[in-house]
Amino acid sequence: MKRILKPPSTFPVKSPMASLVILAAVCGILISTLHAVTRSTIAGNQQIFAAKQLKEVLGDPTQDIVKLTDELYYTMSENGLSGFIFQHTTHEGYNGTIKSWIAVDLHQVIRGVRVFEHHETPGIGDKIEINVSSWIKHFNRKSLNTSSWSLTKHGGTFDHFTGATITSRAMVKAVESGLTRAQDEAVEWTKMAENNSD
Amino acid sequence: MTDTSLMGNTTKTITVEGLWTRNPALVQLLGLCPLLAVSGTFTSALGLGITTLVVLVFSNLFISLFRGMLTDSIRLPAQIMVIASFVTLADILLQYWFFDLHQRIGLFVALIVTNCTLLGRAESFASRNPVAYAVLDGFMMGLGFLLVLLVMGVIREVLGHGTLFTNLHLLLGDTGRDFEIRFQDSGFLLMVLPPGAFLTLGCLIALKNKLTQRWIVNQ
């Protein structure tokens, strides 16, 4: 192929430094312009995405979800405060961290659990994801008093899924510690929610 | 040789090089990180493949446009800056149009900067050739990369997950849901994991070499 090795100099810029600065300015202007134009839409997209996730966890479209912090929301039914949705993290997964949203009512009974970030083995441990398996729904309507928080093969309430005992156990333990946390902080959270709605 | 025939010739050479003889994924073996990471399903392969193609076209265009300015001492940093800028632009646009998809492949979009195909084309082609050729080269190299990514996505999704075109609604909107084909409920786990990507790529390279060999013999 014929290649033109020495291109004709089309720009009257002599100093390499000046060239670099000009190019950087052009790139910077492009990026900041696009960022300015798209920023509000992207922020909206983010909110829609987060809201969709929370609605899924709650499983009840009639209730309002109100933000307290990035990791804690409360829900309102017609009769007022109806429960909380909070983020809970465990580091005992097969490949480390598993993050989930847990929705509870005011009696710390689970309304829903959804994993939103994990590194478990695809095809084996990823059955904790709702897109892959409905296993996670076993936690619905469970509470600390009504269930024995370990796997059936260790005498508990919850079935593990084949090939991923560690992931299953991590998830059961994570939800249990999440519920314990919800119980411990129930008074605090209720106070925060009441202050917020005033 | 007249100007037009030279041009036709070069166009053909660029096309053949990008798609076949110097295919970035099968011959130059560049950009293996995204190739292995996102070829697990057809949808993510398509999403990242198109993004790479677009970034490659624009970075080539830009670098060719400014090639008169880019002396040896600043050429490499300038090229990386241009590539990084266009990857950032692509990242913003993905969040703007396909937020859900961005949640899945967003991590790898940033890694396009480190895809050596882009710097390779900028350095070895765009900085030495006129704008039209540079754009064509970017398009053909990007297309060659995209096609390999898609073939790998199809093979790995069918064998690894037992599905095809799953989650296509992330790219096409709700109509995309109708495309999903489900062969069986589970697949061959190895194909989902990174070794499956290496095996698939190896088989594709072998096939490509076999075809090229046969083609030469026939001539």
Image: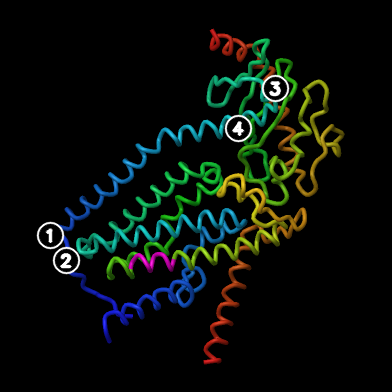
Q: Main SS of the magenta segment? A: helix
Chain under label 4? A
Using the numbered discs, state the Cα–Cα distance from disc 3 to disc 2 in whole angstroms: 68 Å
Chain of the residue under label 2: A
**Earlier along the polypeptide chain: callout 3 or callout 4?**
4
Q: Provide the residue span drawn in magenta.
A: B134-141
Residue at the image position 45 percent from the left and 36 percent from the top: A42
Q: Secondary structure at mark 4?
A: helix
Chain hosting mark 1? A
Q: Would you place residue A129 above or below residue A5 in this image? A: above
> Which residue matches tag 4?
A52
Q: Earlier in the sequence, mark 3 or mark 2?
A: 2
Tell whether position A20 is magenta: no
| Residue A9: mark in rendering | 2
Q: Is residue B98 left or right of residue A36?
A: right
| Three-letter residue code for mark 2 | Ser
The residue pinned by badge 3 equals A104
Label 3 marks a residue whose chain is A
Tags 4 and 1 touching, CB below 8 Å: no
